[in-house]
Amino acid sequence: KHAVMGCAFTWLWSLLWTAPPLFGWSSYVPEGLRTSCGPNWYTGGSNNNSYIMVLFITCFIMPLSTIAFSYASLLMALRAVAAQQKESETTQRAEKEVTRMVVAMVMAFLICWLPYATFAIVVATNKDIVIEPALASMPSYFSKTATVYNPVIYVFM
């Protein structure tokens, strides 16, 4: 039941923040090498910049905050259990493994999304900046690999 609710929330949240350009709040344009489309942060204007800022907050800052809060809570709970069972080597080992996995998950999220979010904010706020198309494509490609990392991290850790 929780998994279905989580998946439904994810789909609804995604739809909520990808639909506005279809109805006139900003737009989608080819980005970088023109192999994919993304939000229009190149044109400027309050219509595009407001969407980019809202997208940055709701689709980068809020998920990153949720991840940090959730994993911090998990680690604190695990530390409390490990502290109660100091002589249990299994518990101590589990704490270390979960801590490594948490660090790997947060780093993977940042590697995937921080370049894209940074690029979007820099281009949206600095209209005079000129970025080569190949360089402009790299953050997009990093973000598209995000779906691969979580299962790989979980399987190998």
Image (cartoon, grey):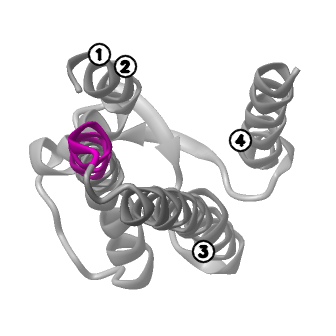
| Res. 114 mark | none
**Which is closer to the viewer, label 2 or label 1?**
1
Q: Residue at x 30, y 56 (%)?
A: 110
Residue kind at label 2, given as amino acid type: Pro
Residue kind at label 1, given as amino acid type: Val
Residue 60 location (% of width, % of height): 52, 61
| Res. 53 mark | 3
How far apart, in angstroms, are the residues tagged by discs 2 and 4?
Answer: 24 Å
How far apart, in angstroms, are the residues tagged by discs 4 and 3?
Answer: 14 Å
Residue kind at label 4, given as amino acid type: Thr
> Which span is picked out in magenta?
88-100
For the residue pair 13 and 9, the one nearer the viewer reads as 9
| Cβ atoms under marks 4 and 3 closer than 8 Å | no
Residue kind at label 3, given as amino acid type: Met
> Is residue 131 toward the left or the right of residue 67 in the image?
left
> Is residue 113 toward the left or the right of residue 139 in the image?
right
Residue that badge 2 annotates: 151
